[in-house]
Image (tube, grey):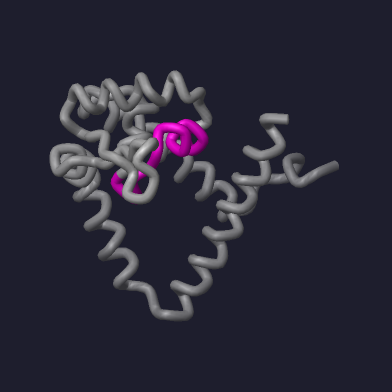
Amino acid sequence: MDAFDNPLPLTMTAVSELVTESVRLRHTLSRRAGLSETELDALQRLVESPSTPSELARLLDISTAASTGVVDRLERHAHVERRKHPTDRRRLEIHVTESGRAEIIGHLRPMLAALAVLDAGLTPAERDVVLRFLTGAKAAFEAVSRTAGK
């Protein structure tokens, strides 16, 4: 008998529902933006930080050839641009443009505002508990991702 023979704890049910809504949100956002989910994922990662094509391929878990195609399509949408690497002139970095940033932020703004209100309603102690749980949940997801590819 294991944990799945009994009803799931409320936290596990809540995480499962959050993951389901997250997947639904990705489908909706990519459709609204006219992008594939991989292109949307790339754009979100590039909003966080510029990346080389090979780094982006690693982050997206795709080939470098596929990464080049993703960047090409995002560039056609004017969401990214290629720039010379600041320290290695032989390399390129991919940077999100204001158009790309506006695309992501525009779609996410209502959700981000709602989450900010939710966060503001937490006490510091509650926030610590939530952060500890979410950090642990993320680590559990990452552990499965690492072993699933082997």
Q: Is residue 25 visible?
A: no
**131 or 40: nearer the eye?**
40
Q: Is residue 2 left or right of residue 101?
A: right
Q: Please tell me whether residue 39 is drawn above or below residue 127 in the rendered image.
A: above
As drawn, the residue found furthest toward the front would be 89
Q: Residue 114's image quarter? A: bottom left
Q: Residue at x 26, y 65 (%)?
A: 117
As drawn, the residue found furthest toward the right would be 1
**54 inside magenta stretch:** yes
Residue 33 at x, y = what percent? Answer: 21, 28
Q: Main secondary structure of the magenta part?
A: helix
Q: Quadrant of the N terminus?
A: top right
Q: Quadrant of the C terminus?
A: top right
Residue 108 at x, y = what percent? Answer: 24, 45
Q: Residue at x 29, y 28 (%)?
A: 30
As drawn, the residue found furthest toward the bottom would be 124
Q: Residue at x 66, y 39 (%)?
A: 146
Q: Is residue 150 left or right of residue 145?
A: right
Q: Please tell me whether residue 133 is drawn above or below residue 48 in the rendered image.
A: below
Residue 107 at x, y = what percent? Answer: 20, 41
Q: Please tell me whether residue 40 is drawn above or below residue 129 in the rendered image.
A: above
Q: Is residue 37 visible?
A: yes
**45 or 54: nearer the eye?**
54
Q: Residue 97's image quarter? A: top left
Q: Residue 36's image quarter? A: top left
**66 inside magenta stretch:** no
State the extent of the magenta-drawn residues as a range. Answer: 47-60
Q: Residue at x 26, y 39 (%)?
A: 83
